[in-house]
Amino acid sequence: MKRIPLVFFLFLIFSPFNVHALSLQEGLKIITETGRDITIARSEEDVARASVSLARSPWLPWIDLYGRETWLRYTPQAIFGPNAVPISQDKFLTYGVRATQLLYDFGRTSAAIDAAQSGLKAREIGTDLFKNLAALDFITVYLDLLESEKLLQVAKEEVQQYEAHKKDTEIRYRAGVITKNEVLQVEVTLADSRQRLLTAENLRSLRESKINSLLLIPLNDAVQPEEIKASPAAGLTLEEAWISAEASRSQLREMDAAIAAKEQNVQSTQAEYLPTFYVSGGYEYAENRYMVHQDNWSAIAGVSVNLSSGGASKSKVSMAKAELRSLKLSREKLLDNIRLEVKSAYLDLQSSAQKIEVAKTAVAQAEENLRLQRLRYKEGVGTATEVLDAVTLLTTAESNSWKSLYGFKRAEAVLLNAAGRDLVAVYGK
């Protein structure tokens, strides 16, 4: 019995190579909870949430604590008859605290808060959009990996077919039935097939690394994906997809929230022409020996009206109204584009379904053709070239069959996304 070298044994034990069994549901959960795109979208949500707090700030008291040292060139004096009487020191310290509370501004702050909340809603909807796009991207890459596995298996089977045919030609050559040229022809074809096998292995490895990149795991870790058996778009009509898209597409809901935010922004800007009522109070101390009371408390009730801002308020209102018109027109355009996107995805799905049936028939015909050509070759009435062509036809048919199947599954995911369906919920069942 041959002994295994210790170094090789230790390598097997401590090898860093990991294999991850992965289902589509597990991958989608990881991508939509901890993926990079989702993390970025949630950070933008935090910015919008802070904007709501900023919009609310005028309703809360503004408190200022201040202190200052004053130096004057001349001592302030007042004339009383023939005498000049000092009324202040030429150097003194002043400090105090003041609180100001807004009472009423005719809806300006309320409209700003509503606009910020609508903006936050738009960002939350945007997060849902990023979530679905990330899910679609992962589903596509996942299906690509499954497809590459099937194509790799087809490439292996092609090599096996050529190797078996090579044995047959060598036997017939040694028996003197065929010439050396036929053997060389098979060997060249076999070498070319092995090249294609290497290409298929590289393709699977690359797609595996793409999965790992999305899952934030080492790129060289092995992933074993599970097959997807469900067909969640089965029975979905074009009209149903249109209705679903208009009701659920994140882009439309995000646009509606942006329009609502802009409408509130217009109201808030228009309110700048109206008065603002406020109260203010505080305490101040000034080191001035000429004053009877060096410290004092104060209370102020006031109103301020913007009579003129150099045209700034009018310009801001005009800009906001123009942006609002632009948003509404953009929504109409977006709705048309979504309907076209849904129809394109629906037609692509129908076409992909038809390709599957055609490909199945082609595989059955190619298998029968290869069987007949092998029989003819063994009986001496066929040529090696005919067998090689039959193997090539079968490989092409099987490859097309798998490509059409996974093309259908990709088209299905694209249609569901276009229809506004939550892909995590749909594929998580």
Image (cartoon, grey):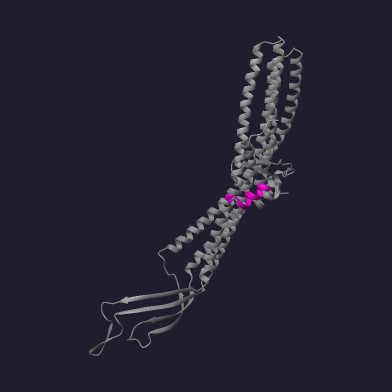
Image quadrant assignment for residue 53:
bottom right
Q: Position of residue 415 (x, y in %)?
A: 67, 43
Residue stretch in magenta? 26-37
Residue 85 placement, left or right of 126 = left
**Residue placed most toward the observer, 249 or 168:** 168
- Number of marks in the rendered image: 0
Q: Which sits in the foreground, 234 or 243?
A: 234
Magenta part, dominant SS: helix
Whether residue 153 sits left or right of residue 119 in the image: it is right
Considering only vertical position in the picture, is 191 above or below 85?
above
**Quadrant in which residue 179 is drawn:** top right
**Extreme left residue here?**
82
Let me know if residue 245 appears in the view. no
Residue 253 lies in the magenta stretch = no
Report x, y in % for residue 289. Answer: 33, 86
The image shows residue 283 at horizontal and vertical percentages of 43, 81
| Direction from residue 232 to residue 68 in the image, left or right | left
Look at the image and tell me whether residue 174 can be seen. yes
Residue at position x 50%, y 67% in the image: 271
For the residue pair 294 and 239, the one nearer the viewer reads as: 294
Q: Name the residue located 52 percent from the left edge and 65 percent from the top edge.
A: 54
**Quadrant the N terminus occupies:** top right
Where in the figure is residue 63, as x and y percent of width and height?
47, 74
**Which residue is at the far bottom?**
81
Q: Is residue 28 magenta?
A: yes
Q: Is residue 252 left or right of residue 369?
A: left
